[in-house]
Image: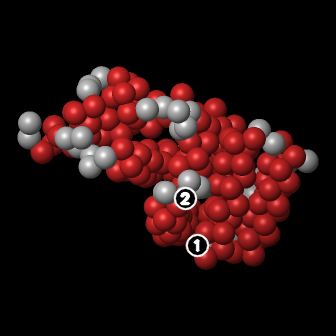
Amino acid sequence: MNEEARRAKKIEIMEKCYDCYADQGFYGTGIKAIAYACGCNVASLYQYFENLDDLIIQSTEYCMSKVEDDFMAKAPADVEGLWRFIDEVPYWTAEKHGKKYRLMYQVYTHPKYREYGQKFFAGVNERYTEYAKLLEGKLGIPYQKLTPLIFILIRACVHYALFEDEFYLKSQIDVLKESLELFIMKYNPKARSGTLTE
């Protein structure tokens, strides 16, 4: 098996492993169930990962990075698309990625894996700052102002995906929209900002 094929197989295993845990639950899902879900035997898993912990750590990091990319790929192209994005994305991500978010928190709050969660979220800080820089040119708002707003939106989306708490979601989204309106008025007053939803 060449390196490209090996990498593809490893990605396939990570995705199937993560989906298996997300569907069946993190606790009580053993290595045999994971191997079965991945379409291989336990020995085959250990050709790609040192042990079960390594499989869990790498699968969580890889799959949640993909969720993050998926989320940001829907980011608005301009101010006109901003309000649609904010209104739609919490429900879209809850439906599409809710189980993955729930699993991520189970993994990264486990004492055994907490340090890996800290590393992952340190990387999130950097990546969201880069996303904010990309949005700066589209929205006309400095990335330093956009970065914390991205965190508010993501936190609201994840909280909704975990608990389907409409009150929390609406309160966060209302503050986010008001902040964006003010920033647009200050930094990009020529843009048509749309109307805040009540």
Side of 70 relative to 148 (left or right): left
The amino acid type found where label 1 is placed reads Tyr
Coordinates of residue 70 in the picture (x, y in percent)? 49, 44
SS assignment at label 2: loop
Q: Compare residues 193 and 32 and report the one nearer the observer.
A: 32
Mark 2 or 1 closer to N-term? 2
Whether residue 151 is situated above or below residue 143 in the rendered picture = above
The amino acid type found where label 2 is placed reads Pro
In the picture of the structure, the residue carrying the numbered disc 2 is: 111
In the rendered view of the protein, which quadrant contains the N terminus? top left
**Looking at this rendering, what residue extends furthest in the left direction?**
2
Q: Compare residues 2 and 145 and report the one nearer the observer.
A: 2
**Marks 2 and 1, how far apart at CA:** 34 Å
In the picture of the structure, the residue carrying the numbered disc 1 is: 143
Q: Residues within 10 Å of mark 1 (few under 14, many from 20)?
A: many
Label number found at residue 15: none
Q: Residue at x 36, y 39 (%)?
A: 14
Coordinates of residue 158 in the picture (x, y in percent)? 66, 48
